[in-house]
Image (cartoon, rainbow, N blue to C red):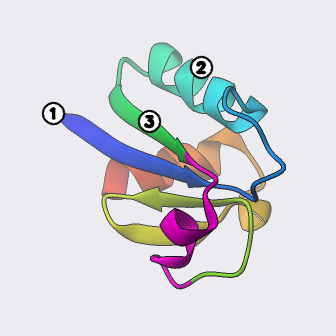
Amino acid sequence: MSTEIKILQSSCCSDGSPIKKQLENIAKDNDLELHIEELSDMQDTMAYGTMSFPSLVVNDKIYDFKKLKSDDDILAIIKTA
């Protein structure tokens, strides 16, 4: 089963962010299937009601990426989603 993850970032950040690479590495190391989408258009990001960037949306739940201290924190969120 694939986990849907959206990376919400400000418009100054380009596709291929380090966050995406980090998520891809977590998926690879833990044999997970992730569908990752990067959103930086203001209309797309504002639809989620957060002003904290970057943020992760994991199966429609929003997390402030800056509060996630490690890969283990991110993995825990993915596994409980």
Q: Amino acid at mark 3?
A: Ile
Residue 24: image quadrant is top right
Q: Is residue 27 left or right of residue 67?
A: left
Find out whether the residues at labels 1 and 3 contact each other: C-beta distance under 8 Å.
Answer: no
Give residue 13's position: percent from left, percent from top. 80, 44
Please, is residue 65 above or below residue 27 in the view? below
How packed mark 3 is, by other alpha carbons closer than 10 Å (few <14, some 14-19, many 20 or more), is: some
How packed mark 2 is, by other alpha carbons closer than 10 Å (few <14, some 14-19, many 20 or more), is: some
List the residue tagged with mark 3.
36
How packed mark 1 is, by other alpha carbons closer than 10 Å (few <14, some 14-19, many 20 or more), is: few
Image quadrant occupied by the C terminus: bottom left
Residue 45: image quadrant is bottom right
Separation of residues labelled 2 and 3 (CA atoms): 12 Å
Element at label 1: loop
Separation of residues labelled 1 and 2 (CA atoms): 18 Å
- Name the one closer to the observer, 36 or 47: 47
Residue 46 belongs to magenta span: yes
Q: Amino acid at mark 1?
A: Met
Give residue 68's position: percent from left, percent from top. 71, 59
Residue at x 47% of width, y 76% of height: 48
Give residue 72's position: percent from left, percent from top. 62, 43
Give residue 73's position: percent from left, percent from top. 62, 52
- Indicate which disc, 2 or 3, sits on the residue closer to the N terminus: 2
What segment is highlighted magenta in the picture? 39-49
Q: Nearer the viewer, mark 2 or mark 3?
A: 3
Residue 57 belongs to magenta span: no
List the residue tagged with mark 2.
25
Mark number for residue 1?
1
